[in-house]
Image (cartoon, rainbow, N blue to C red):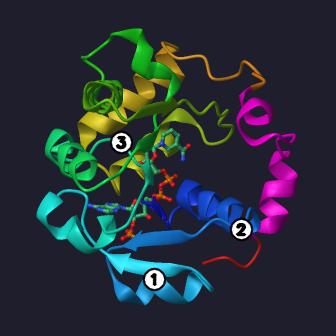
């Protein structure tokens, strides 16, 4: 059984879809049962990554886990996962994690998560390269501040406005990891038309 965390989100939903297409047994972690209708044909379980004690049902019989970064007490969550038979963890991280700039809030939580996974002995660490195009800086700041703490807004401005992170480099990672070519943004958008 493969446990996918963040299964209702952008990345996790894609991982679920890919695993189902590959005929792998998938369990999707959700925080609210209302998320279930989006996950047809996939076993779902509730749990909160910030509360390792809530993950007991989610971990049962799991041999591999797709894990989002940045949650509290990852070392405890990973130690429990190892104890109950998880053999492999794929961590979704980001390109900035290797920069060493721990003053950046996003870099800090990604680097801490990578360290925790490496220390657990269950590591498979996956970076993800993306390019963002769009709003003016003022519009972007206002939009981000509406939904996230100011230090994370500063972190993204540090990456993409100051320019401390370059995610425009095209790498062969998607083909290497998945065995097929990456989709264009247009193809991705067409696939997700109508998804709430
Ligand atoms: N998307 C990117 O470009 C990107 C790039 C690099 C790294 N990342 C990292 O990957 C994460 C996910 O990205 P995304 O774009 O897929 O995000 P998203 O679409 O916003 O989805 C976030 C997911 O995290 C789940 N979640 C939130 N808090 C949780 C908790 N306490 N316990 C368990 N699940 C929880 C949400 O579940 P609910 O349905 O319960 O809310 C949802 O499935 C980001 O937060 C970031 O750390 C993302």
Regarding residue 191, the answer to whether it shows in the image is: yes
- Magenta segment, which residues? 173-192
- Which residue is nearer to you in this view: 173 or 158? 173
Which residue sits at x=25%, y=58%? 49
Q: Provide the secondary structure element on which disc 2 rests.
A: loop
Distance from disc 1 to disc 2, alpha carbons, whole Å, reads 22 Å
Q: Position of residue 178 (x, y in %)?
A: 75, 42
Q: CA distance from mark 2 to mark 3?
A: 26 Å
Q: Classify residue 187 by image quadrant.
A: bottom right
Q: Is mark 1 within 8 Å of ligand 1?
A: yes
- Viewer-nearest of labels 1 and 2? 2
Please report contact status of discs 1 and 2: CB closer than 8 Å, yes or no.
no
In this figure, which residue is indicated by the disc labeled 3?
69
Which quarter of the rendered image does ligand 1 occupy? bottom left
Reading the image, the residue beneath label 2 is 23
Residue nearest the observer in this picture, 181 or 55: 55
Q: Are marks 3 and 1 in contact (CB under 8 Å)?
A: no
Residue at image location 32% in from the left, 53% down from the top: 85
Which callout, 2 or 3, points at the residue further toward the start of the chain? Answer: 2
Q: Which residue is mark 1?
A: 35
Residue 58 x, y percent position in the rendering: 32, 69
Q: Quadrant of residue 100?
A: top left
- Label 3 beta carbon within 8 A of ligand 1: yes
Q: Residues under labels 3 and 1: Cα distance? A: 20 Å
Q: Earlier in the sequence, mark 1 or mark 2?
A: 2
């Amino acid at each position: 059984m493969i446990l996918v965390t963040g299964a209702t989100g952008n990345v996790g939903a894609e991982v679920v879809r890919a695993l189902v297409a590959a005929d792998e047994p998938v369990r999707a972690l959700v925080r609210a049962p209302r998320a279930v209708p989006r996950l047809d044909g996939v076993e779902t379980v509730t749990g909160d990554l910030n509360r390792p004690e809530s993950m007991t049902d989610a971990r049962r019989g799991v041999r591999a886990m797709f894990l989002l970064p940045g949650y509290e007490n990852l070392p405890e969550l990973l130690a429990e996962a190892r104890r109950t038979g998880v053999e492999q963890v794929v961590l979704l991280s980001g390109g900035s994690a290797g920069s060493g700039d721990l003053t950046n809030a996003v870099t800090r939580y990604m680097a801490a998560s990578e360290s925790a996974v490496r220390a657990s002995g269950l590591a498979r660490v996956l970076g993800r390269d993306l390019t963002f195009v769009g709003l003016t800086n003022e519009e972007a700041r206002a939009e981000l501040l509406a939904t996230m703490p100011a230090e994370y807004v500063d972190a993204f401005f540090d990456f993409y406005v100051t320019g401390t992170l370059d995610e425009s480099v095209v790498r062969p990672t998607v083909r290497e990891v998945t065995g097929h070519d990456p989709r264009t943004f247009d193809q991705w958008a067409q696939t997700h038309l109508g998804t709430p």
